[in-house]
Amino acid sequence: MRIEEHPILSFDKGRKVNFIFDGKAYEGYEGEPIAAALHAAGILVLGHSHNKQRPRGFYCAIGNCSSCLMVVNGQPNVRVCTEKLQEGMVVETQVGKGDLR
Amino acid sequence: MRTTELAIIGGGPAGLSAAISAASLGTKVTLINRDDDLGGQLIKQTHMFFGSQKQYASIRGIDIAGILIKELEKYQDNIEIMNDATVISMYEDGVFSVVQNEKYIKIKPQSTIIATGASEKFLTFPNNDLPGIYGAGAVQTLMNVHGVAPGKSVVMIGAGNIGLIVSYQLMQAGIQVKAIVDASPKIGGYLVHASKIRRMGIPIYTSHSIKYAHGTDHLEKVTLSRLDEKWQQIPGSEFDIETDVLCISVGLSPLTELLWQQGCEMRFVPELGGHVPVRNENLETSIKGVYVAGDVAGVEEASSAMVEGRLAGLNAAEALGHTSRDLEDKRKDCVEQLNSLRSGHVGEKILSGLSKVTV
Amino acid sequence: MLEKTGVATEQDLKNSIPSKERLAKGPVAVIECFQRIPCNPCHTSCKRGAIQPFADINDVPVINVEMCNGCGVCVSNCPGLSIVIIDETYSEQEALVKIPYEFLPLPEEGSFVTGLDREGKPVCRAKVVKVLNTKAMDRTPLVSLAVPKDLSMTVRFMKLNDIYSDNTFVCRCEELTMGELRELIRKGYNTVDEIKRISRAGMGPCQGRTCRQLIMQELAASTGSKMADMPMTTFRPPVKPIKLGTIAGGADHE
């Protein structure tokens, strides 16, 4: 859900870009964090904890915690709350701790 | 390895202010900032600040960031800014390392001001890890920086200034705040903030706490409970509120890892948010040439952080051999500003905390 | 109590409410700031020097109401949004309450909104008389609400939708809504009797027992006339519905 109008702020968005999340196409704005684009699209569960399989969402938004680790363009353990969205990115839910490649 | 006269770690209100005052005396400053933009948490603060004109009272936090950056630009010949750069380690010989764009950079400064700020405290209750449960800072970032609503409705835990302000900001963004909950019998934040929330019809439940969060994949409902005089939950007093977001705003703790790594003498002072460095009146820690300013030295308002930054910048610059005719006046002015900001009812706690770590 | 609930009590407000004499002279600032916090923009922004200098920045503001002309500059400069302007000279029945309103959409001048008290409870219908939003106010616009005079010290906020809204029913028998009633009043039907004749409100089975008072209230709110002065409808028999057969008669009528 995007905030369309605000009494104090105006949001300078980048251009619209397309990205893939778990095989499906989504739209977001270039340069915004991947997590913001996913949240705006209503996706709250970004992964599951590797031991107890608990659903994990966005938590700190500034790259402090471990709640939003995902696979981005094949690279595991990317903190999507700070990683900037770019055209054509492939974002995947991470299973476990991620594999070394 | 790079060298610099003065390294300032942190580009928030304290770090920016320190950079301005040190550079204004001719010090060569390297300002290291974790984010893409300078300003730290100021860039999310849509409300008008308190204080007096010297601390930009009545101006919105977002605009104060702009004012400080502009002031900084006056001294750009003396300042090197490293954005998107995180200090990841600090050693006893004063050398520290920075990661910027996947590059590892070692820097040896003659002096350092640490202005790393604070991080949010977490809270324990069953299912506290469900998606939809966010820190107040995260909610601010999402809605005020990125323009994305955190959800449809919010229950706020914490009636301190941050909880009250973020609740108001949520309403401004068109998101319903269903309740503000605080375990304390009294509202901790400024009462004018509380009153402006209340007249929008939002209840503030003092002496209440969260007992349980419900939901399978994400938050759907919270159970609240009333507390007795001993802050214990009263059985049978529980009630539920349906909500898709729970926002946690139960205080901050100083972000002190780098101080520990340097070997600064630290003390645990609850009034200041946790472990903080012992410092002298020049804001210099137990290690010569290492200064602190802002929340890392003890959690306070941004107004005090800015003044502390100015003061630390002046002191560090002077110790490095820079001076000006009005240095003493400037320093006196900072000290007076801090004293007046801390002289009120809210300042009592801060002063009591500071008395335990100022040597 | 204030520090537990966030709502100022009568005790808190005692010293912040100007005297009747002062209120009768024209607009004045009412400052509801009761806690010592480090903050002084109300004083520094007051061009008339009415808000007294602070000896200590934590002092609670003190206003000399004789020097205040209710200009409203302090309202949008107060970081706590704790100041309103009250003008009890606005009209015979109504006072103006000017509040800071940092929300979108802004209300339209001339529209009706719901006046809220310090707890956010709806207390009246309020007319938006003016919306001031200058550059100097820096995104803290000032909304002037006309409210019943006895609520000038009660109304402190507003919500956009008028809870006495157009979709509520005024007359249950003939199904007249508030919106339809307001439209009739706008068209010039300005007495209870005229409204009764054009809308049938008051001619149903209850014979006006449900709607008459509401119609009078709305007429008073919309036209400014006093309920005491309103011409009444004609009351005709029967006062409650009876069977035609009863009138048509029977052998045992007396």
Image (tube, grey):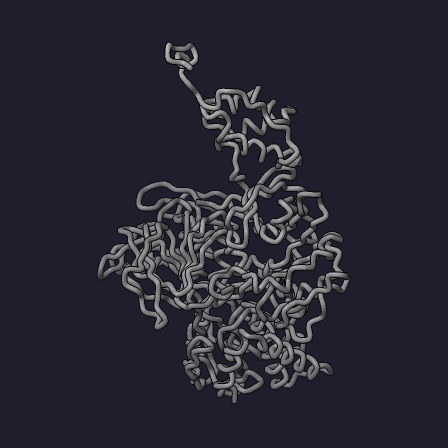
Residue C40: % across, % down:
66, 67
Q: Is residue C239 left or right of residue A56?
A: right
Q: Say which residue appears at 66% left-offset and 58% top-offset.
A: C30
Residue B300: % across, % down:
52, 72
- Taking the view exactly as shown, the residue that stands out farthest to the left is A52
Can I make out residue B8 in this image? Answer: no
Residue B237: % across, % down:
31, 60
Which quadrant of the figure has residue C111?
top right
Classify B122 as above or below A11.
below
Q: Is residue B134 left or right of residue B17?
A: left
Please state the total of marks drawn on the protein image: 0
Q: Say which residue appears at 52% left-offset and 89% top-offset.
A: B359
- Taking the view exactly as shown, the residue that stands out farthest to the bottom is B359
Q: Say which residue appears at 36% left-offset and 44% top-offset.
A: A20
Classify C234 as above or below B214.
above
Q: Which is nearer the eye, C180 or C37?
A: C180
Q: Is residue C148 left or right of residue B8?
A: right
Classify B195 as above or below B329.
above
- Taking the view exactly as shown, the residue that stands out farthest to the front is C254
Q: Say which residue appears at 52% left-offset and 70% top-offset.
A: B10
Q: Which is nearer the eye, C91 or C5?
A: C91
Can I make out residue B206 in this image? Answer: yes
Residue B271: % across, % down:
46, 78
Classify B32 as above or below A10.
below
